[in-house]
Image (cartoon, grey):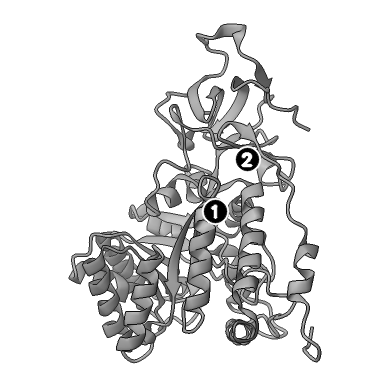
Amino acid sequence: MFATLPAAARYRLTNATVPACLVEGTALAPDAEGLARADLTIDGATLAAIRPAGSPDPDGAALPALDLDGGMVWPAFVEAHTHLDKGHIWPRAPNPDGSFNGALTAVRGDRAAHWSATDVRARMEFSLRSAFAHGTRLIRTHIDSDPPQHSVSWPIFAALRAEWAGRIELQGTALVGIDRLLDDPYFDNLSDTVRTHGGMLGAVTYMVPGIEAGIDRIFRHAIEHGLDLDFHADETGDPEVRSLAMIAEAAIRHRYRGRVLVGHCCSLARQPEDVIDRTLDLVAEAGLAIVSLPMCNMYLQDRRSGATPRWRGVTLLHEMKARGIPVVVSSDNTRDPFYAYGDLDPLEVYTQATRILHLDHPVGDWPRAVTATPAEVLGRPEFGRLAAGGGADLVLLRARRWTELLSRPQADRIVIRAGRAIDTTLPDYRELDALLAPAEGEAR
């Protein structure tokens, strides 16, 4: 177990291990695993200094210190793709067969029956409390925005964003089918709602008639109003589903200069090599960023009753990264019909992504995929890195090496916000029991 942090406003964390790829502005000597020993000075809410472990400190022995005995220090985490409005509905809306279509049907029914302002707020806040306790600083959430739900969920999102500011920064993006954007009254109403509540536009690019027109429209509108874009694309194993290339072509065609994040892109891994190469060249030229959701996609993709899945359901992150495409991993859904598990813990995401996507041997700079890279992609580069003069928002771990970090859940972590340790007690699921109890006559 950790000792407690010094009570003083200014103190030192000594004999720490840091992933060198997350340190900026300080020259350290990483080992063969990309890890370096360092001493960190905390001054109030600021990470005042990072020095090689054991190097002279101007404050000398005057500052109280906590010897971490080689334990890791990470910056606070960043989640680039979640669904806070869906979270934790599994007890009353389980997925009957674990399939993507089963998830769609279960969510639609639960949304129509239960998603009041009280319900959405309670579940979103429960998720935020969990993410905060795990050490998350920035979250982008997709918000189901088909009417009339948009008039309920967006005001709740805006209120929670204000209430959680300084603890977790929240971004919101609309989630609708791309075909809906061809409906003029619908699109105008959606755009007004999103811009009123400080959100951004997004869509699921199903391969439906009119997909090209829908993608063009969302790009034109984003340019007109200065909005970033966020897409769900190709969340299937069908190799004929290829909307990622369409999005990249549209970004190039419209000379779009905003940020575009595209999630899932699963079918890319099932396509011929020449198609893959062409698509990745387009994605790189367009300046798109890609987020993989490894836990959720492994859960949903290639699920067949009574059969073993034959592929992992994830996209080609290594190949993308080799082309300079920004790539990140994130949680996606949490205890809902799209993913029955999860707790919005980016460290779990990183651990599972390492196993599923082989982000190791060497680890290299893959720790950036849940920290610095998503912070940059979301337009908040001040987060997700260890830098002298930056914020003292840190996660302290007992693990000293990658094999220790990735073998245990690190449940005894210390989360530091603005230089002070927070209460990392997770909310109890029992708090949601009354809200999630099936109505009389409903199946559990």
How packed mark 1 is, by other alpha carbons closer than 10 Å (few <14, some 14-19, many 20 or more), is few
State which quadrant residue 284 falls in. bottom left
Q: Is residue 299 left or right of residue 293?
A: right
Viewer-proximal residue among 306 and 5: 5
**Quadrant of the rendering where the N terminus is positioned:** top right
Q: Position of residue 48 (x, y in %)?
A: 48, 23
- Point out the frontmost of discs 2 and 1: 1
Local secondary structure at mark 2: helix
User: Residue 120, image x and y in percent?
Assistant: 61, 71
Residue 238 in sight from this viewpoint: yes
Question: What is the three-letter code of the residue carrying label 1?
Answer: Glu
Q: Residue at x 57, y 84 (%)?
A: 104
Q: How many marks?
A: 2
Q: Which mark is residue 417?
A: none
Q: Is residue 166 left or right of residue 135?
A: left
Identify which residue is drawn at 64% across, 71% down: 118
Q: What residue sits 65% from the left and 77% below the top? A: 337
Label of residue 163 in the image: 1
Given contact means CB atoms under 8 Å apart, are the residues at marks 2 and 1 in contact? no
- Residue picked out by circle 2: 402
